[in-house]
Image (cartoon, rainbow, N blue to C red):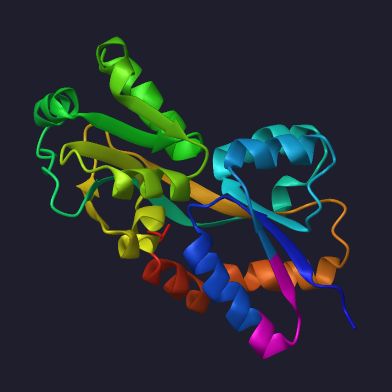
Amino acid sequence: MTDPVRILSADAPKGGLRLNAETFSRETGIAHEIELATGPVIKQRVLAGEAGADIVVIPRPEFGDLVAAGRLAADDIAVIGLVTVGVTIRDGAREPDLSSVEGFVRSVLAADRIIYNKASSGQYIAGLFDRLELADRIEDKVSILPTGKAAMEALAADTSGAAIGFGHVTEIRLHYALGTRLVGPLPKEIGRQTPYAAGILDNARDLDAAEALVEFLISERGKENFVKAGVVHA
């Protein structure tokens, strides 16, 4: 029996990734395993030779250092789609103004709590607050959680009625059952869409199986499944 294809993925595209991997395994008989971690952790593990995976799925820009370190070849990287940073609230909470940058700033300053994660979307939000000169003004209200799921759970548990959460739209949509909802993307002037890609590592156990799975991810059917999960067609 062929070993399962091991996938180490960031949280953002996980809904579409799971759907595609399950379909691939059902149709080919090639099993798969998915492990989730933040993008920075994945990159660190790959560079240290401790990925324990055949395929990694992280933001496309993060692959540069991995290619330079010889962990994979640029030809073995395939973009699967774009993931948008979004704004979320607990059901019934005050809705932030996303119609303009000015309205967004007012809403952030008026919030009782601001919640995001340590992964790539959270790193973008932290940098955005710096650029908008908000960081020092809101530091006492900020909660930074390890993962997107943890951030959504913290938002769902906040009863102030004036908390704002941030994360990738794909992650936000996965956790509606917690009692949170997507308000929308950031104002277009400060918005962000991150390209995510799948890369086959140089020490993949079964190169043919890994290549077949990545080919499925970027096929028309694969793209349709990612779109269903909130990934924007690249």
Front one among 31 and 190: 31
Q: Is residue 211 above or below residue 192?
A: below
Judge whether residue 53 can be spotted in this image. Answer: yes
Going 78% across and 58% down the picture, which residue do you hit? 54
The quadrant of the picture occupied by the N terminus is: bottom right
Along the horizontal axis of the image, is 75 left or right of 228? Answer: right
Question: What's drawn in magenta, residue-wise?
Answer: 25-33
Front one among 191 and 36: 36
- Residue 14, image x, y percentages: 52, 61
Along the horizontal axis of the image, is 67 left or right of 38? Answer: right
Q: Quadrant of residue 30?
A: bottom right
Judge whether residue 187 can be spotted in this image. Answer: no
Q: Is residue 148 above or below residue 15?
A: above
The quadrant of the picture occupied by the C terminus is: bottom left
- Residue 37, image x, y percentages: 62, 47
Going 30% across and 50% down the picture, which residue do you hit? 156
Q: Is residue 231 magenta?
A: no
- Residue 104, image x, y percentages: 15, 31
Going 26% across and 12% down the picture, which residue do you hit? 133
- Residue 201, image x, y percentages: 79, 52
